[in-house]
C-alpha cells in the first residue's frame, strides 16, 4: 500500500485542491494612499485574494535561478502542475513527481475539517 492510498492523505489532497481552486493571488489597482500622488491619478497594487499558506511555502522552497531586477520571489513551481499532481494522488493514482514528497508532508500536517472528510469509495 502506497502512502497516497490512505484515506486521510487522500482527503487532505482533496482539501489542498479545493484551496488551490478557491484561492489564488489576485491584485487590483487602488488610488495611492498619499494624497499628493492620488490627485495625479497614481495607483498602487492591493491584494484582494492570496494563495494558500502551504502553497506559498512550497513555492518559496523551489526558487528559480532567474535573475530579476526586483526582490520579489520567483518560483520553478507551476500552479497547474501542482493541481495535476494533486488530482492524480487524490484519485488514488500514483505519481512520480519531484514535488510529491513535499505534498505528502504538507497533507500529513493538514487538519481536515470534519465536514470535508470523504468516505473511501465502496469498491
Image (tube, helix red, strand yellow):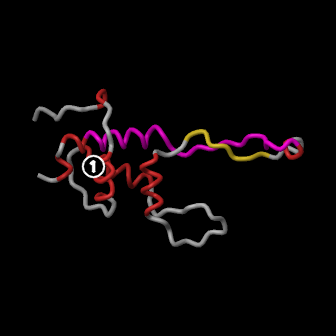
**In the image, is 72 to the left or to the right of 12?**
right
Residue 84: x and y, percent? 34, 51
**In the image, is 8 to the left or to the right of 21?**
left
Q: Is 78 above or below relative to 14?
A: below
Q: Which residues are magenta?
A: 11-35
In the image shown, does 17 or 47 lie closer to the viewer? Answer: 47
Residue 45: x and y, percent? 69, 46
Is residue 23 found inside the magenta-colored segment of the image? yes
Q: Residue at x 54, y 63 (%)?
A: 74
Q: Residue at x 16, y 34 (%)?
A: 121
In the image shown, does 53 or 48 lie closer to the viewer? Answer: 53
In the image shown, does 38 or 77 lie closer to the viewer? Answer: 38
Question: Residue 99 is drawn in which quadrant?
Answer: bottom left
Q: Residue at x 25, y 57 (%)?
A: 95
Is residue 16 found inside the magenta-colored segment of the image? yes
**In the image, is 30 to the left or to the right of 118?**
right
Residue 82: x and y, percent? 38, 53
Neighbourhood count class around disc 1 (C-alpha, 10 Å): few under 14, some 14–19, many 20 upward: some
Q: Residue at x 46, y 58 (%)?
A: 59
Residue 119: x and y, percent? 19, 32
Identify the secondary structure beneath mark 1: helix
Q: Is 47 above or below relative to 122?
A: below
Q: Quadrant of the C terminus?
A: top left
Question: Residue 39 is drawn in which quadrant?
Answer: top right
Q: Is 99 above or below relative to 16?
A: below
**In the image, is 17 to the left or to the right of 117?**
right
Q: How many marks?
A: 1
In the image shown, does 22 or 102 lie closer to the viewer? Answer: 102
For label 1, the residue is 88
Amino acid at each position: 500500500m502506497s502512502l497516497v492510498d490512505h484515506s486521510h492523505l487522500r482527503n487532505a489532497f482533496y482539501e489542498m485542491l479545493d484551496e488551490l481552486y478557491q484561492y489564488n493571488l489576485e491584485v487590483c489597482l487602488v488610488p495611492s494612499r498619499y494624497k499628493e500622488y492620488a490627485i495625479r491619478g497614481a495607483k498602487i497594487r492591493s491584494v484582494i485574494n492570496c494563495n494558500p499558506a502551504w502553497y506559498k511555502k512550497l513555492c518559496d522552497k523551489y526558487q528559480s535561478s532567474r535573475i530579476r531586477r526586483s526582490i520579489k520571489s520567483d518560483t520553478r513551481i507551476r500552479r497547474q502542475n501542482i493541481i495535476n499532481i494533486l488530482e492524480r494522488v487524490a484519485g488514488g493514482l500514483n505519481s512520480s513527481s519531484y514535488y510529491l514528497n513535499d505534498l505528502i508532508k504538507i497533507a500529513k500536517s493538514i487538519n481536515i475539517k470534519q465536514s470535508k472528510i470523504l468516505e473511501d469509495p465502496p469498491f
